[in-house]
Amino acid sequence: MNPKKLLMLPGPTNVPERIMNAMLTPLMGHRTPDFAYLMKNIVEKSKQVYQTSGDVIVFSSSGTGAVEAAITNIVRKGDKTIVTVFGEFGERAALLVEASGGVAIKVEAPFGDVPRIDQLEEAFEKNKDVKALVIITNETSTGTMFKWLKEAGDLAAKYGSFLILDSVSNLTADDIPVDRIGADIVATGSQKSLAAPPGLAMVSVSKKAKKYIIDNPPSRLYFNIARHLKYAEIGQTPFTPALSLYYALDEALNMALEEGLNQRIQRHKLCADAFYSSFTAMGLKLFAVEEVRSNTIISVNYPEGVDDKQFRGMLDKDYRVVIAGGFGPYKGKLFRIGSLGEVHRYHVVTTVSAVNDTLSSLVGKTRSEDPVEIARTKLRDL
Ligand SMILES: Cc1ncc(COP(=O)(O)O)c(C=O)c1O
């Protein structure tokens, strides 16, 4: 058995005890009124965090399932689809478009930055009849965030395209008002900003997307949104749901709504800001361009001479703080901290302190300011 560790990963995150305990609720039949009641509650609460009056579907899968459902239920053979690519998850979305027989039109930005609205507009202008625009709202692989969601929604509406969002890592941590943006399908996962265990994923479905999918059901079984919508009418899922995780998700949604969405978003901003300020004070170079830095994933370049495996190994062994490394070409070049879900002053100050001590022992102190004090001060009122 692992000793308890502070999981400062970009998911899975630390899960509050209330949520873990919810999973001890005895199982129920999934074709019973009891389950219909649970499902109704989860959907109602999910609609609040999605800020939508549309439908919400829960899949017993990881986040990728929701992204796959979002793309494959809309994109069909030959459909042109614009995809923002500024990290691994954008690349995967483009792959899903191609796997659906669609044509992925990549709108790219160097990793560490994000594409801008004028790049998206240019792509719409150059390519008539674009079926869908897919945006990764928070690129977990690089720690960057696409901020112009309302403008993107307006663009999609102007060009008559569906808008699909991969918000797997930042729904409830950042403001993603689905209806106001005009987003058609928004994917998220349980183990990120919602602070539940991994294993469930959700999509919101707009009225427009619902009509399209019901009129043109996809030729697939498990991630078939039309099928899920039909079963939802009688408070069921087409396939056996991961019941214990449903209890956890229900409690995670209770916690999010008790805290209040605005308060939760503010907390994530404050914690991210404290991380960024403390790491800057340590003399570290932040990976993402300042304007588009994520409020949930803190990406930091390693100083010269620090070995990724050794550094993260020391954090884990000496402080029981677990963080992530870089992705793909950035493996070994940067570390990433998940500041999401269950993240408060304790998590930030402990992590900053552990990183500071570990780096000091590896490369020596670089600055005279106390980064731990900076984090503490920044989060004084949290
Ligand atoms: C933006 C984004 N999309 C999709 C995924 C895939 O989610 P999962 O690993 O739960 O399948 C992740 C996971 O990190 C993510 O951050």
Image (cartoon, rainbow, N blue to C red):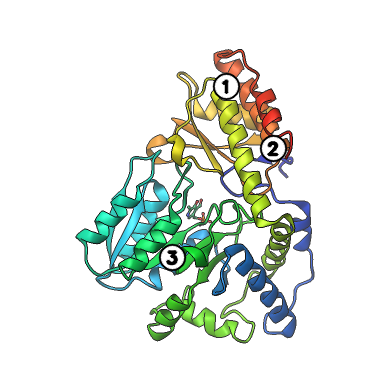
> Which residue shows up at 54% across the image and 15% down it?
363
Camera sees residue 248: yes
Q: Position of residue 260 (x, y in %)?
A: 70, 56
Q: Which of the 4 image quarters holds residue 151? A: bottom left
Q: Nearer the viewer, residue 51 or 97?
A: 51
Q: Which of the 4 image quarters holds residue 381? A: top right
Q: On the rendered structure, is 20 left or right of 101?
A: right
Give the Cα separation between the discs numbered 1 and 3: 40 Å
Give the Cα separation between the discs numbered 1 and 2: 18 Å
**The disc label shown at residue 347, or none:** 2
Q: Nearer the viewer, residue 57 or 176?
A: 176
Disc 2 residue crowd, few under 14, some 14–19, many 20+, Cα 10 Å: some
Task: Looking at the image, tell me whether mark 1 or mark 2 is earlier in sequence order.
Answer: 1
Disc 1 residue crowd, few under 14, some 14–19, many 20+, Cα 10 Å: some
> Which residue shows up at 68% across the image and 80% down it?
30
Verify CB contact (< 8 Å) between mark 1 and mark 2: no
Q: Nearer the viewer, residue 336 or 193?
A: 193
Query: What's under tag 3, amino acid-wise?
Result: Glu
As helix, strand or loop, the secondary structure at mark 3 comes to helix
The relative height of residue 260 versus residue 241 in the rendered view (above or below) is above
Q: Nearer the viewer, residue 274 or 313?
A: 274
> Which residue shows up at 48% across the image and 21% down it?
303
What quarter of the picture does the N terminus occupy? top right
The relative height of residue 209 versus residue 343 in the rendered view (above or below) is below
Disc 3 residue crowd, few under 14, some 14–19, many 20+, Cα 10 Å: many
Which residue is tagged 1?
A: 281
Which residue is tagged 3?
A: 68
Query: What's under tag 1, amino acid-wise?
Result: Ala
Comparing labels 1 and 2, the label whose residue is closer to the camera: 1
Quick check: is the Cβ at mark 3 less than 8 Å away from ligand 1? no
As helix, strand or loop, the secondary structure at mark 1 comes to helix
